[in-house]
Image: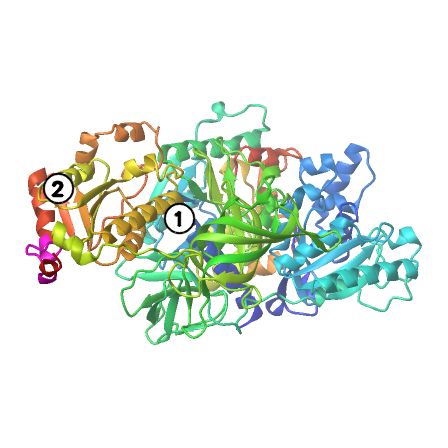
Amino acid sequence: MSTADERLDELEAQSIYIFREAFARMKRMALLWSLGKDSNVMIWLARKAFLGHVPFPVMHVDTGKKFREMYQFRDHYAVEWGLDLRVEPCPPLETIDPTLPPATRSAARKTEGLKLALEKFGFDAVVAGIRRDEEATRAKERVFSPRGLEGDWNVREQPPEFWDHFNATLPAGAHLRVHPILHWTELDIWAYTRREGIPVIPLYFSQGGKRYRSLGDQDITFPVASDAATIDEILAELATTKVPERSGRAMDHEAEDSFERLRVAGYL
Amino acid sequence: MSVISATNLATLPVAAADRHLVRIVIVGHVDHGKSTLIGRLLHETGGITPQKLDQLKAISARRGMPFEWSFLLDSLQAERDQGITIDTSQIRFQTPSRDIILIDAPGHAEFLRNMITGAAQADAALLLIDAAEGVRDQTRRHGYLLHLLGVKQVTVVVNKMDRVDFAEPVFRAIENEIAAYLAGLGVRASAVIPISAREGDSVSARGARTPWYEGPTVLEALDGFEPARAPGDLPLRLPVQAVYKFDDRRIIAGRIETGELEVGEEIVFQPSGKTAVVKTIETWPAPPAGREVRALEAGAPAAITLDREIFVERGEIVAKPSARPHAARRIRVRLFWLADEKLEVGTQLIARLATSEARATVAAVHQVVDPGHLSTFEATGIGRNQVGEVELALSRPIAADPHGVNPRTGRVALEIGGRIAGGGLVVSVLDGEGTKPVVSRNITPVTSAVTDSERIARFRHDGAVVWFTGLSGSGKSTLARALERRLFARDGLVTLLDGDTLRAGLNSDLGFSDADRAENNRRLAEVANLLKGLGHIVLVAAVSPSAAARGRVREIVGERFFEVHVSAPLAVCEARDPKGLYAKARAGEIRGFTGIDAPYEVPVAPELVIETDKLDTPAGVDRVEERLVQAGVFHLTPRAEDDAGL
């Protein structure tokens, strides 16, 4: 076995361990499916952890502004993979903090949609596909990350996490974010997607010299210049690029602290 | 903003597919220059994106500050404001043969929990010392924690050599002091390197101003670190994470911490001591016929089926019968402690070892270590950010190894008030070799002066436990009370133990968390068993929703245990709602209420099922009584020996 395969095996083993710990310790868990490459890998890992089953609901907090290809993908694979899919709408823009910059404000709808969905179903844990290498504040995350009653994240008071012992005790009304692929990189995601043959939304592949590296709402997500039309070509591109993965996500760049403000308020 | 993206692989001597990933934590006293070294390393390995550099320069300019390499890491606003790293960040870059994840752990004492979180993930460590300040308390404390956390590969970097004019004697004095300190902990520094991170000496290129130094540069030292592998050469340890029954398979799931496992092997579960043979190793997607997985190595996720149905649960450790872990009731632990509450004799904790958890009480504080000087002293407690050795008494046996025997199953995390607040190495397992809970040596159970046969002669029955389980409102107490009246009327020795009644007194210290519910059940079972031994027919009415907990009750009580599932549809129970609890649960006033937002696990093979929506109470009592008769609990004629005795 090659070193690269061993690395993927180690990443996979760690994620499976996290999934099983979360499922064993939490009462009502749901997985957040953003339909992107990361959450598709996450669903695959859940099926590995639970031997072909996803024994908890899969929730799509829908802004209503995703790409057509994303909705098609969702509806097709929810059936094929036997998922207990819950689609939950986000509240309209008018209800969101108007002091936020425009794209950030738009993205914050998802935070509010998530809060409403958590209340509706009483989930005590949500599994989210964030990664440390995506963005600087995500690098600070724990694998099990307790959130306050408002879904807020207190980055200064996080309890320690070591030897795969996770903090799962919550005050009433609070919830836990579980991050099974926190330790993966964008390159790992693609290498694993290729090895396992995980389905991919075609928007990630180059058309007319552009492709999406990260998928979000249509109006605040932009493609990057790229000729990569296959996973192999994406892997080759990522090995040399110096452009950050989220460069096409408008809300990250409006203000120095816009993404951090989103996350402290409960954004993923 | 991504943290750091990959460098150009084509210029590197080792191909991507053959590169090892190594996680390295960088620790040391605050202000000794960690962030500057990391910034410099990133720059010299080509790992900084142009956007990132531009962004940081722009921020510096906006704030009217000169650009510093350390700005790279201070990516959270809070950090920039305070000028210290408050949490663990991870930075990726490449050396000639390694992909490196550099974990930047905060040096400030206040953030020790974050240093520990960072260091515990690391394969190796860089310990940074300011040449002008020398070895400080925090340097030693971090060194000590590396030892406790099990980080074996350590390189020491003596930074800011420019501040001491690159003077060899200054460096040698620090080198000797730190090497001796680490050696005292059993840690060997692979190198001690004199550098200037700010000016770039000996980071990637050999420093011209330290001609007397012949060791590796920082980059060379990083390139020499190896990934820490799951130990395959130790005996098998597979902690059980869960037992799954999603389909017709009953799957034991976990991860192999050490050793190897093969289909067809005999295994033992500790602490229960149950044995079985591995029937299959399950994987998904299903492999083609003939390509099934037959063996697993250390580090691999495991999902196995067994050749027989045995009751095992999360927390047990699978081993081979010839080399099994201890079933520990008392352990001595060398630990670090991070909570404000002092750790003292009597402090109540939750101890977590692999996937097991047990209540733990500090039985003794043996020593407190001042890691600043590596001296030990007698003290009554271990304060915040101190280390020391304590003895923990556990509420139930858990499988454990001494750390020297198996590092993965010889360490515990300690939780207080629902938060992980400490952790440590199992120095020794003090008693409890066998599978039975071990009672303290000073306790000798006193046997009763009255014999079983004398009791049977008087009461005409054996001791027994009838355990009524079911939803709230299903009619458990009603049935139990009617049965109590019936048995009393026939001169039986009958005792009703009601879950709620016991909660009012004996179990008033317990809440409704999973752990507390389990403890509540254990106490009910122990009390019931005690009374059974004294000839009582004990009637227990308790929701007891967990199949696993009921399984433990069955084990504690042993023979003449009757599990009676008092069953009625949820809607019926909710309509009855004798205590008004369903209404409260629906209104959200009670959380975790069985049947509403917590599951009731229906008994698979109870001795009896009474459907209270179909049978009235007297008929239900008849059924239970018949079952007891059938099992021979009642002795209708006195035994001959009893006559002789009178």
Residue at coordinates 48% horizontally, 64% vertically from top-left? A195
Expressed as whole percent of the image width and height from the top left, the position of residue B93 reads: 68, 57
**Number of numbered markers:** 2
Q: Residue furthest front?
A: B646
Residue at coordinates 71% horizontally, 42% vertically from top-left? B74
Which mark is on residue B488?
2
Horizontal side, residue B482 vs residue B403: left or right: left
Q: Quadrant of residue B47?
A: bottom right
Gap between marks 2 and 1, in whole Å?
68 Å
Q: Is residue B209 something that shows in the picture?
A: no
Horizontal side, residue B456 vs residue B22: left or right: left
Quadrant of image for the C terminus of chain B: bottom left
Could you tell me the amino acid type at mark 2?
Phe
Could you tell me the amino acid type at mark 1?
Phe
Q: Are marks 2 and 1 on the same chain?
A: no
Q: Is residue B631 magenta?
A: yes
Which mark is on residue B558?
none
Q: Nearer the viewer, residue A203 or B105?
A: B105
Does residue A93 lie above or below B115 as drawn? above
Q: Residues within 10 Å of mark 1 (few under 14, many from 20)?
A: some
Expressed as whole percent of the image width and height from the top left, the position of residue A223 reads: 56, 45
Expressed as whole percent of the image width and height from the top left, the position of residue B5 reads: 65, 53
Residue at coordinates 48% horizontally, 26% vertically from top-left? A93
Residue position marked by numbered label 1 in the rendering: A73
Q: Nearer the viewer, residue B556 or B140?
A: B556
Q: Quadrant of residue B183?
A: bottom right
The subunit letter for the residue under badge 1 reads: A
Q: Is residue B58 magenta?
A: no
Expressed as whole percent of the image width and height from the top left, the position of residue B83 reads: 75, 38
Q: Quadrant of residue B278?
A: bottom left
Q: What are the residue bounds of the magenta stretch? A: B629-641
